């Protein structure tokens, strides 16, 4: 797949996500919660790419993952995937909290 096609796919997924979730303060609240969870849990690996974790904002590392869709990424985060432990090792996190963190990380791929 060409780089241009991959970029277009990410843009399309971002647009679909925005349309499905709506715009406004609700989105801002979800992204703020997601950032908080990222900072307290996900950042440990996703800031540096530890154990193969895709680095926050690195489009090249995220393109194939983002193409799988938000639901698949949430399932991976909930259940663990590869070397990533379930819920990033924080079992107290709920599905909506994990989803918020995934949304936050995906939001960093937007141009």
Image (cartoon, helix red, strand yellow):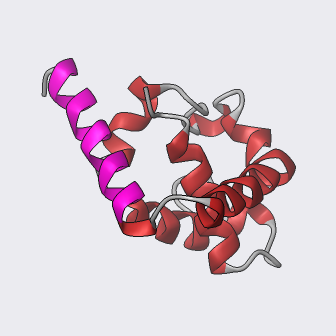
State the image quarter where residue 59 is shown: top left
Q: Residue furthest front?
A: 24
Residue visible at 13% across and 28% down? 1
Q: Is residue 111 visible?
A: yes
Residue visible at 66% across and 55% down? 28
Residue visible at 59% across and 31% down? 55
State the image quarter where residue 8 is shown: top left
Asked if the stretch drawn in magenta spans residue 98, the answer is no
Residue 103, image x and y in percent? 55, 55
Question: Is 106 placed left or right of 40 in the picture?
Answer: left
Asked if the stretch drawn in magenta spans residue 5, the answer is yes
Question: Is 23 placed left or right of 2 in the picture?
Answer: right
| Residue range of the region highlighted in magenta in the rendering | 3-19
Q: Can residue 71 be seen in this view?
A: no
Q: Considering only vertical position in the picture, is 78 above or below 51? A: below
Q: Considering only vertical position in the picture, is 84 above or below 1? A: below
């Amino acid at each position: 797949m060409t780089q241009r096609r991959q970029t277009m796919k990410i843009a399309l997924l971002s647009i679909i996500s925005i349309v499905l979730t709506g715009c406004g303060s609700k989105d801002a609240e979800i992204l703020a919660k997601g950032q908080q969870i990222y900072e307290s849990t996900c950042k440990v690996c996703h800031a540096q790419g530890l154990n193969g974790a895709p680095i926050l904002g690195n489009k090249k590392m995220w393109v194939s993952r983002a193409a799988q869709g938000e639901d698949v990424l949430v399932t991976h985060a909930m259940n663990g995937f590869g070397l990533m432990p379930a819920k990033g090792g924080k079992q107290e996190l709920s599905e909506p909290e994990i989803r918020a963190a995934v949304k936050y990380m995906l939001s960093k791929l937007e141009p």
